[in-house]
Amino acid sequence: MTPRLTAADLADVERIMAPADAALDRLYPGDTGERQPVHTVYVPADRVGAGVVAGYAAAARAALDAHAPSPEALALATGADPDEVAAVWPLLLAKLEREPVEDLRIDLEDGYRGHSDAEEDADAVAAVGVVAADPPPYWGVRFKSFEASTRARGLRTLDLVLGAALEAGPLPDGFRLTLPKVTSVEQVQAMVLACERLEAAYALDHGRLRFEVQVETPQVVLGPDGAATVARLVHASAGRCNGLHFGTYDYTAALGIAAGHQAMDHPVADHAKNVMLLAAAGTGVPVSDGSTNVLPVGPARQVREAWALHHRLVRRSLSRGLYQGWDLHPAQLPTRFLATFLFYRSGLDTAAGRLRDYLGGAAGAVLDEPATARALAGFLRRGLHCGAVTADEMERLTGAPATTLDDLALRRVG
């Protein structure tokens, strides 16, 4: 059989498709390859003291020593499988020693109240200097929102923070800015303008400043036109949006949920986060869950109950494709890392085996397509990044080095 379509026919098809192809590449560039931290630890600016990260590590370990000094005790407290907890116990202790905080956010918004302008100026600059002196992999600030009543204060804080960060040295790659309580596309456009002006004022490269958008108002999830405003926010950020973070309590309160029922696993929260995942899919913008405000403090029984809740909620978020969340207290670090490590290790053998079959062209029990293989590689990369799996273990299980996982997850190979 001889094909009847000519080169001219193909050229006409290409002409029609060229604008759509260009738009798809621009709007949905895919995973950037950047590591996504498993959590963001929020610390009010006036509580950021010297050695804040080491202090969180010490407090987390002290909570373990007091309430779960052994794998068996931690399994009992959280309801996790004792054998599985015992297997990750050395990894958990090593994580608290090596990297207890992956991402720290100096909070100058909801967690920072009752201060004068002069006090906020001083606290913002001082906190940045402290964290910059001994930074975790990712860190930054949450300043006040661009609502009319706090806009000027938020911009002033942002300006002072950037100056203080640059005073400490070159702006680190892991530097983060968080724009809270977004209600409109215009607020994101205004943040883009502010970033451009600050880059010019501080002689930074264009595009150097990026920011996270907090999704904590109903208007962002469903706009007056019936559309998902959050999707418009991502594309209105001119490539500067590097995260969508859910605000559990502002959002559920705004929908009239009674205080006793406001929680990460409330159905209205699940709906909002599903919309966020859809809006961010393919854009390279990571999505983060919020926090639980039930803290592991007080009597032993209360600590164990809070740990069990936190462990369950973190595992729940991970299973729903939300690979990051907020932690508000150092005693939440053990259950954050426990739940995260157990999640990645529970799927490790299966995911690694399927990927090994795919890379080797072997016929396994599951016939995986390229898109699934990319998802498998992405899952394994996340486990490697957070410390749930070692590089040697990953290579032994998949038969491939970590660079191969990177290439597959980031679509560098077919």
Image: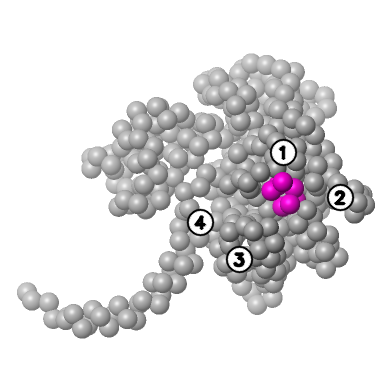
Q: Label 4: which residue?
A: 284
Q: Between residue 178 and residue 210, name the one nearer to us.
A: 210
Q: Is residue 339 visible?
A: yes
Q: Label 2: which residue?
A: 120
Query: Bounds of the magenta span?
Result: 161-167
Question: Which callout, 3 or 1, points at the residue further toward the start of the chain?
Answer: 1
Look at label 4 and name its amino acid.
Gly
| Rendered image: mark on residue 237 | 3
**Where does residue 197 sit, x and y in percent of width and height?**
69, 65
Q: Residue at x 47, y 53 (%)?
A: 31
Q: Between residue 193 and residue 341, name the one nearer to us.
A: 193
Q: Secondary structure at mark 1?
A: helix
Spatial CA span between label 4 and label 2: 34 Å
| Mark whose residue sits in front, 3 or 1 | 1
Crowding around mark 1 (Cα neighbors within 10 Å: few <14, some 14 to 19, many 20+) is: many
Q: Quadrant of residue 228?
A: bottom right
Look at label 3 and name its amino acid.
Ser
Question: Which callout, 4 or 2, points at the residue further toward the start of the chain?
Answer: 2
Locate the N terminus by quadrant.
bottom left
> Which colour assignment does the render follow?
one colour
Most common secondary structure along the magenta stretch? helix
Spatial CA span between label 4 and label 3: 13 Å
Look at label 2 and name its amino acid.
Glu
Question: Which callout, 4 or 1, points at the residue further toward the start of the chain?
Answer: 1
Q: Secondary structure at mark 3?
A: loop
Residue 90 sits above or below residue 295 on the image: above
Q: Is residue 267 visible?
A: no
| Mark whose residue sits in front, 4 or 2 | 2
Q: Between residue 32 and residue 160, name the one nearer to us.
A: 160
